[in-house]
Structures are given as C-alpha cells and as structure tokens.
Image: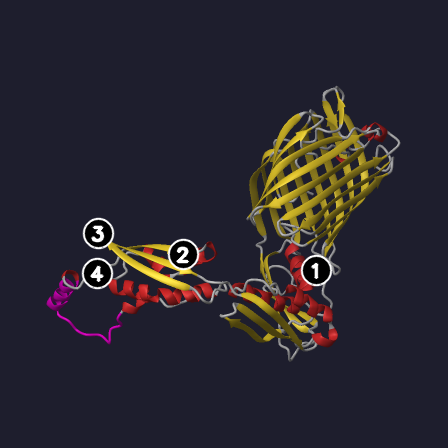
Amino acid sequence: MAGRSFDPLRATRVKPHGPRRMSVLSMVFVALAAIGFAAPAFAKYDIDIDAPRSVKKLLKENLDIARFAKRDDVSDDQFEFLVTAVPKDVRDLVATEGYFSPVVRTDVTTVDDKRAVKVSVDPGPRTTIASVQLNFTGAVTTEDRAQENAARFAFSVNEGDPFTQSGWSDAKNAALRALQSKRYLGAKIVRSQARINPRAHIADLSVTFDSGPTFTLGKLDVSGPKRYPAWIIDHVNPIREGEIYDAARVNELQRQIQNTPYYASVAIDADADVSKPVETPLHVKVSEYPYHSIRYGVGYATDTGFHIQGGYSYLNTFGAAYPFTISGRLDQTQQYGRVQLAMPPDAHGWVNAVFGSYTITDVSSTNIYSARVGVQRSRSRQNIDTTFSLTFYDDRLTQNEPNPSTARALVPAWTWVRRDVDDPLFPRRGNIIRAEAGFAVKGVLTDQTFARLYTNAVQYFPLGKNDLLLFRAEFGGVFTSGPSSGVPASLLFRAGGANSVRGYSYLSIGNDVAGSILPTKYMVTGSSEYQHWFTHDWGGAMFFDIGTATDTWAERVFQPGVGVGVRWRSPVGPVNVDLAYGFKSKSVKPYLTLGIAF
C-alpha cells in the first residue's frame, strides 16, 4: 500500500556478527576482492504503466517498481523482487480507491542490456457505497440531538458514492470532530466497519460514536509568561468558568490573546478526561515577543504604486507593559506616520490609548495634509471590534486654484466592525460590515458643525462548490448646513479605484474644480461580482461597479464600470488582477490588489 514502510532494497544489507581483528594485508586483500570480483550487477530499467487515469497517478507515485526506477543502485536480485511484488502492490494500492478485483500483467523486455518494464492494469469495476449506518451512544442521545445531527451532516460520504479509503477515513474523522466541537470533548469512535463485497462491488459502512459526558470549562492554566504580566491573558479571556465546552469559544480565546501585541504564538489544549468533565482546565502556552521589535516591508498596488512601510515597538513602557509604537508608510500618493502609547487591556478587555498622526495625500491634482491627535478606547470580542475615540483634526487642502483651505474639528466617534464569515482569509459565505459615526460642534475646537456617517458591507454567497457571488455596498455622508470646505478634507469622500469603482483612476470621482478632484459630502458605491474557480487556487471573475461622489445629492451622477479578472489563493492571501472599462471615463484600467477589499 501507499504507506508501506518495507524497503526491498534494504533486504540485502547484512549485519555483522561482531568485531573481528584483521591484518593490514588481509584488509587490503578483502578490499581488492570486493572491488574486483564481488561487485554486484545493477539493473537499469525504464517503467511504463498502462492504466486508466483514475489509478495511473496513484501507481506512478507509489508503486515500488516505479519509485525505484529512478535509482541506479538496484541489483539484479532486487529487480527480480520488485517485479515479483508488482501484482500484490497494485492490488493493495488500487484497493484504497475502491477497486478490489484488478487484473495485472507485468512484461519485462531487454534490448541492448537495457530493460523495460510494462505494467498493465485493468482495475475492474469500482466499489460503490451501498449503505451508511451511523450510531450514537452517550449523553448526546438525550441532551443535544442537534449536535448529533451536526455529526451526521459532517459525515461526507453517502450511499451511491464511490468507496475510497481516504474518503472513508476523512468522513469518520470529520464526523468525530463535529461531535467533539461542542459539549462532547471526549467523544470517540468505538466501532468502525467497512464490509466490502468484491463480487457485487458494493461496500456497507457502519460507525458507532460514543459522545461521552458534557464537558464544562474551568480555569486557565497559563504557562510561558516571563516578560509581561500573566493577568493580561485573564483580562482578554471571554470564557466564563462553568460554561459548556465549545471549540469556537476556545478559538475565540486564542484569537483574543493573539490580538494583543505581547505574544508571538499561542497554543491551547483542554483535558479530554471523560472521568473529569466538569470545569476541565484549559492549558494555555504562550511565547512572548521581546520588548523591542522592528518590522518593515515593501509592496505594490495599482492605486498607490510601490510602497515601503515600517514600525518600531517597545512593549514595556514605564515597566508596566504599556506598548509604545511608531509606524509609517510611504507610497506614490501618500505619506503616513503615527505615534501611539497604549495601556494593557483592563479587566473587561478594553484597551485605552493616546495617539498622534499625520497623513499627506496627493492624488487627482489635490493635496491634503491632515494632522491628528486623540484618545481612543477599543475592544475586540468574538467577531466584533468596537472603538470609541475623540480626535482633533487639523487639515489643509491645496488644489489647482490659489488660496489653500483649512479646517479644524474635534470629533467624538464610534466605529463598529463585524466579521461573520466562514474563512477570514478566503471567505465564501457570510458578511463583513463596518459602521462609523461621529459629529463636531462649532466653537468646540471646530470650524463648522456637522455629523458624519459611513458604512461598508460585503456579502458572500456560495453557488455550488466552484462558484461565488459577492455584493459590496458603501455609503458615506457628512451632514452640515455649511460648505464642504468647512469640514476637514480627510473626513469627506471620493471614489474610484481597485477597492471602489473599477474602470476609473484612484480617487478620481469627486467634485471637479479647475481639474482638481475635491472630496465631497456624499459618496455611494456598489459592486457585484461573480467568481468561478477552475481549481482550488485559481479562478476567474466578472464584475459590475457603480458609484458617485457629490456635494449636492440632487446633482449626483453615477459612473459605472465593468470588467473581468483573475483570482489566486496565494499563500499570503487573495490576489486579484482585474481589467475594467469605465463608461464615463471611456478608458480601460488594470488593477492589482492583495487582500480582501474592505
């Protein structure tokens, strides 16, 4: 079989019985005899496997005689052993794919001292699954039938499917994991049987699961903290002692710890002792980041061009685990810098921080300088991030016309983000929603009274196994009785670009004044996209985008764009390459983005 550990080439090795003294002359004689008279004959051969596609790759990669054809140290005896073993090896291998009555023929020919081996395989009819019987014992039968149904649903093979050993094993393991994921941490398989009828080419499958008792969660057993206080982990722990075990809650604990700046890795394990299911402890092992760290990187995006970014962090300011960070980014359209001093999370998981930042954006013949200082209070719980902030903005806008405009505002704001998707990196189902709200009052370090709202939502709909439909909607509005020039420009809106309306240049949709595209009070964009995945990692897309940005809603002009693209599930995240046509701009624009647009 594919997992065989027996190596026929090792069968010729001889283990000496023990040490023996030899003279120098004797050793030389033995060496000469070994070289001149006892050299083994090596068999060089080519291999050809004639088999249907369903098993040919399996045989090429795992059949011993095929694997050893690449070696040049196969002796004649070993070659004969490999040829003799072919029928059994083939039967063992194709049985894992549900073929239990193969016909195998091995032909060996020799031409000019060169051997050729041809292995012909007719795998015969494939075995299909005639019946599947799943049985459950333990507390699940009376406590939580929904969890039993979840395990049944996770069992991924059904009547009529082809039988394979890997599919059978994967189905059992998936059902067991589903049963263990909530309440029944100690669940196990107590009986498993696949009855194969090689004459009828059918398989009858049966599995019995024992759920064991319901587990509840107890205290944390933390190991690894040396530099930073262990109570940081307790403060971000969302689990209450005595609550029913749920793998999703344990994962949430891991995410909360990982979201703090202190820990490089987090491993969590729970005791699965069915004799002690009440308040089972969670063993948390962490490795810490050093006090000082420097991070940097370079990249490229169509909208902003090449960029370089970096940051420095010191995680033990005042000797009290206060993280101090300096970060910055430089690209072809923007310069950005930020300094922040934060506190460790409090007993409810909230993190307080003070910060200062500046941003210089130069795009669409409009230069915006924005300096900010403020305080914020933020917390991440389950799939929701919440931030309250108080920020002072001092902005300056320079355009093609003379006399730059300035605006100041003191803005209390609230930001809320919910991520409810099946996969955070490559989502296929669920949604991501962001909402922001803020206001400013004239006279309170503010030039003009206004209220500001912003929201962005992406919804994912799977269509079968290989297709995906996604919709994105975005709205921003600044509500004020005065002109937009009285509001800090960085709080206003423009549209266009890879993550907005494709087919138009980056931030090119706005208020056109003497060739400068100025930010506006209102912005709306929307997008629909259909994706088809040809393989697991590569797919194609078609999309339609539309949007507008305007100071006067009654005078809005929507600008649509359409296009096609390539999608790649890269090791570091989704990569999107798009080509879009803007109907209003009458131009074709290419786009390259990395990551989920939000």
Tell me the CA gap for discs 3 and 1.
Answer: 75 Å
Asked where in the image residue 482 lies, by quadrant, the reply is: top right
Residue on which the image places disc 2: 60
The residue positioned farthest toward the left in the image shown: 25
Which-is-in-front pick, marks 2 and 3?
Answer: 3
The disc labelled 1 sits on which kind of residue?
Answer: Val
Q: Mark 2 to mark 4: distance in Å?
A: 25 Å
Mark 2–mark 3 Cα distance, whole angstroms, equals 25 Å
Give the class, few, some or many, for how many residues have Cα within 10 Å of label 4's Cα (few <14, many ≥20): few
Q: Dot 1: few (<14), some (14–19), or many (≥20) neighbours within 10 Å? A: many
Q: Element under label 2? A: helix
Q: In the rendered structure, which disc, 2 or 3, sits on the residue that comes first in sequence?
A: 2
Mark 3 vs mark 1, foreground winner is 3
Q: Nearer the viewer, mark 4 or mark 1?
A: 4
Q: Position of residue 400 (x, y in %)?
A: 72, 20
Residue 236 circle label: 1
Residue linked to disc 4: 41
Q: Earlier in the sequence, mark 4 or mark 3?
A: 4
Q: Nearer the viewer, mark 4 or mark 3?
A: 3
Looking at the image, is mark 3 or mark 1 earlier in the sequence? 3
